[in-house]
Each structure stands twice: as C-alpha cells, then as structure tokens.
C-alpha cells in the first residue's frame, strides 16, 4: 500500500455506487502489474460533481454507472462518436486536463457473448429492454453482424432504440413470437421487473442477464437446457477496454474474474477519514444516531487517555510520539462491533493504520478541498498549520495525503454541505448496497 509522487487515481461514480464491484477488478490489475494506483467508489449526487472531482483531485480515469452515463456528457471536453450515438458514456479518461468520454459497454457485451457463443455474425439476438443497457447490447451485437430485435414494454421507447441503433423492434408482450428462433437472448431489464417467460427457447440458446447482482434466469436456464451467461461477464469485458484506455494495459479476463472472486462480506464497523476540517466528527455523530451505532472519535480518545490536548501532545512530545499514540489508540478498537470511528486527519500516514481501516471497517473519505477545509478552521488548534504560510502548509499536507486517503477508503463522499446531509448520503449508500 505504499504510494509515491507518481500515484494515479482511478474510480467509478454513480448514485448509488457503494454496490459497485469494479474496484475489485481494477485493484487486482494494479497488484498484478505493480502499479502505484488506487481505484475508489466516488459517491456523488450529480454527474457535475464527478467531473469536478476528476479535475480537482486529479483522476486519470473514471468509470461511470447509472444514472450519470448521459448526464456526464455535458461536463466533458470530448466524446467519441459511439458514445454520442448511444448518448451514454461509461468511461472517462483525463489527458493533460482534458476529459474524454468513451463507451465500452457495447464492445463489452459483444465480447462477453462471443467468449461463450463464438462468432455471433448472422445470429438472431433478442434483447429485452430499451434502456441504456439494452441499447448498448443492441449496438454491440449489431457491430458483430448479428440480427437484432429489441423488445420493450412501451412501443415509443422500442422505436427510439431501433432508430438509434438500426435494429428491429417490437413490444415485450410479443416475446413468445421470438423465443423459438432466438440464438441469443439478453435481458437488459431491472432485476425488480417481473420475470419473463423463456420456456419457448430451444435447448442450447444462450441467455445473458445484464444484472450482475442477482438473476431471475439462471435456474430457469438450467432447467430448460439453455446456456446461461452471468452479468459479471459483461462487467468484466467492458472493463478490459476501459483499462486499456486508462493505462495502456489489456488485462486478461481471468485476472478480472479473480478480482471479483475476492469480494468480502460488508464490515460491521464504519470509519471516516479525511483532511482536517472535513466534518468527520459532526457527520460521524449524525451517522451513529441514524444507524444506532456507537460513535468514537480517535482524537477525543487520545486526549482522554493522555489527559492532554492534541496540540499540547505535539508541543511536548512531538509529532512522531503522537503518531505512535494514535496508532495504539486505533488498533485498540480491534474486536469491537457496531462502531463508527472518526479518525484524525493524519491517521492514514501509517501503513498499519491504513490496513486496519481497510480490513476492519467500511471506510469513507469525507472530501473537502484544502481551501474549504481552511475556511472551516477558525482557531489555532491545528499544530501542523501553526506559524506562517498556513495556506501553503495546508495544500502541501493535502497533496501528500490524497493518495493515502484513496488507498484506505471504500468510497469518497463530498462533505461540503451540512453534516446531516453528509451522514444521510453515507447512510443511503450503505442501505442500498446491502
């Protein structure tokens, strides 16, 4: 988890985004190729905030998921023809400060299908759903020479998707007219929608579900002798060209699948990290109230243990001794459950601490810019900013700590609003990821 001046930031954004499994794949890639890089979930309310953070933090690349794939377009400098045609960007690359938008969804679904079904040129592909996923699937299959029909509950949306891609269209209610002759069926409708009847499909037909959380069709496909392709395959194969755009590396699919297999159960504890003045204590108390959890502030715990103010510990014992005490205090919390830990701004400086946060907690980076943080600090209680050149010191500290926050966190949340709104956002993300 060591980082240097050449550290590169990558991530995925959406609303919600805590459920995203993309970090598992990209962290596996970075480990395999010994890259000094981080990949984090960026939880924001608006696509504009994601674009702003790309520029402000210095992200090299960011994947985009619902509902920002269309909205992000207006905040980019350049967008490829395919992404414009689909009105959907799922990959953003920063090059010398220029944000470039791409769509790798359509190649991802085509590659995923062909990895199982072989060459799909001339095959009959039926797609359920005319939303963004359905349109991408149609364009991807068409690009490989397949004959595509897109079906939707309402006809206007089906017609719009057909005009956009050049495929055929019909109502979803007529699905049974197409199932007997289909070679490939792609469900691009939400898991929450009613299950479709696929019993009329011939044994050997390939069935893909775009949903990678759960699928209504895996067990049905097994009973009917159909070849089921899980949504994770699409996730993997769209990530390969995204990685190539990000890094120049084309990773093997098996490496990304290995990363997905490392998924761990949600942690019972939550930690909040971030620069001084980012609102960790205030938001932490609100979040603890919302989730009925115990709140612990490491700085308060240290002051109680040492019977000294943090500033006095720095003055009398020095920063190095303070960092030792800080580590001892954090590690003493191991084994506790149902706690929310508000961490001091510099707790990420030690590798031991970062490992604890990663392994023992769901860690949220509460983000405020250095300038915003400084505007909130109205006293002289921050020993590292003492003396002259407070702004210069703050910016230097912030730049040093950014990659460490990124390495430790589960997700980034903007905390520039009031603490209650920050806590509400985190709480929503956690609840929707369960």
Image (cartoon, rainbow, N blue to C red):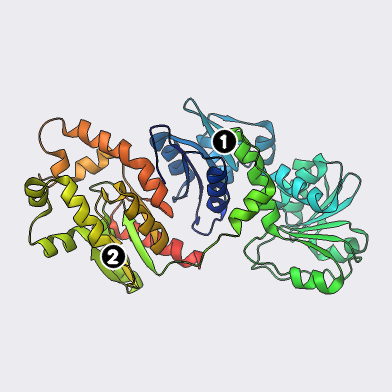
Comparing 40 with 129, the one in front is 40
Label annotation for residue 246 = 1
Q: Position of residue 98 (x, y in %)?
A: 50, 27
Q: Seen in the image, is 370 located left or right of residue 413?
A: left
Q: Position of residue 343 (x, y in %)?
A: 27, 56
Label annotation for residue 286 = 2
Q: Look at the numbered discs 1 and 2 and tell me whether their residues touch, using CB distance below 8 Å.
A: no
**Which residue is located at x 87 percent, y 66 percent?**
176
| Quarter of image, res 259 | bottom right
**N-terminal-most mark, 1 or 2:** 1
For label 1, the SS is helix
In the displayed structure, would residue 267 be above or below residue 281?
A: below
**Which residue is located at x 9 percent, y 55 percent?**
309
Is residue 132 visible to the viewer in this orientation of the structure?
A: no
**Name of the residue lying farthest toward the top:** 96
In the displayed structure, would residue 106 be above or below residue 344?
A: above
Residue mark closest to the camera, 1 vs 2: 1
Is residue 111 visible to the viewer in this orientation of the structure?
A: yes
Neighbour tally class for label 1: few under 14, some 14-19, many 20 plus, Cα within 10 Å: many
Neighbour tally class for label 2: few under 14, some 14-19, many 20 plus, Cα within 10 Å: many
For label 2, the SS is helix
Q: Position of residue 56 (x, y in %)?
A: 39, 35
Label annotation for residue 145 = none
Q: Seen in the image, is 116 located left or right of residue 89?
A: right
Q: How many marks?
A: 2
Q: Seen in the image, is 408 located left or right of residue 150?
A: left
Q: Position of residue 368 (x, y in %)?
A: 31, 45
**Which residue is located at x 36 percent, y 64 percent?**
270
| Quarter of image, res 209 | bottom right
Distance Cα–Cα, label 1 vs label 2? 37 Å
Q: Seen in the image, is 126 located left or right of residue 31?
A: right
In the displayed structure, would residue 378 be above or below residue 171?
A: above
């Amino acid at each position: 988890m060591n980082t240097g001046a050449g550290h590169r930031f990558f991530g995925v954004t959406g609303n919600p985004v805590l459920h995203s499994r993309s970090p598992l794949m990209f962290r596996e890639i970075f480990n395999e190729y010994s890259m000094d890089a981080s990949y984090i979930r960026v939880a924001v309310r608006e696509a504009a905030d994601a674009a702003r953070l790309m520029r402000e933090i210095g992200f090299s690349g960011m994947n985009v998921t619902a509902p920002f794939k269309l909205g992000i377009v207006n905040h980019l400098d350049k967008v490829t023809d395919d992404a414009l045609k689909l009105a959907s960007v799922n990959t953003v690359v920063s090059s010398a400060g220029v944000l470039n938008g791409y769509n790798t969804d359509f190649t991802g679904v085509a590659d995923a299908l062909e990895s199982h079904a072989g060459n799909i040129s001339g095959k009959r592909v039926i797609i359920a759903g005319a939303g963004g996923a359905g349109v991408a699937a149609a364009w991807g299959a068409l690009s490989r020479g397949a004959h595509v029909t897109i079906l939707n509950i309402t006809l206007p949306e089906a017609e719009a998707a057909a005009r956009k891609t050049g495929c055929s269209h019909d109502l979803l209610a007529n699905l049974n007219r197409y199932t007997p002759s289909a070679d490939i069926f792609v469900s691009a409708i939400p898991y929450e929608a009613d299950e479709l009847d696929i019993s009329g499909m011939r044994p050997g037909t390939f069935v893909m579900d775009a949903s990678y959380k759960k699928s209504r069709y895996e067990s049905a496909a097994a009973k009917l002798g159909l070849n089921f392709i899980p949504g994770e395959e699409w996730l993997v194969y769209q990530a390969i060209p995204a990685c190539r755009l990000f890094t120049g590396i084309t990773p093997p699919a098996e490496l990304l699948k290995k990363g997905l297999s490392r998924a761990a159960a949600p942690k019972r504890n939550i930690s909040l990290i971030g620069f001084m003045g980012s609102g960790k204590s205030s938001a932490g108390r609100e979040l603890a109230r919302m989730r009925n959890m115990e709140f612990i502030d490491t700085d308060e715990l240290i002051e109680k243990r040492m019977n000294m103010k943090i500033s006095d510990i720095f003055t009398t014992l020095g920063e190095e001794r303070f960092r030792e005490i800080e580590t001892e205090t954090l590690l003493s919390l191991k084994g506790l459950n149902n706690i929310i830990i508000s961490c001091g701004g510099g707790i990420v400086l030690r590798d031991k601490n970062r490992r604890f946060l990663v392994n023992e907690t769901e860690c949220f980076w509460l983000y405020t810019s250095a300038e915003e943080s400084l505007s909130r600090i109205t006293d002289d209680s921050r020993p590292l900013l003492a003396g002259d050149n407070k702004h210069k010191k703050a910016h230097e500290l912030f730049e040093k700590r950014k990659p460490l926050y990124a390495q430790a966190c589960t997700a980034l949340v903007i905390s520039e609003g009031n603490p209650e709104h920050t806590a509400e956002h985190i709480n929503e993300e956690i609840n929707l990821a369960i």
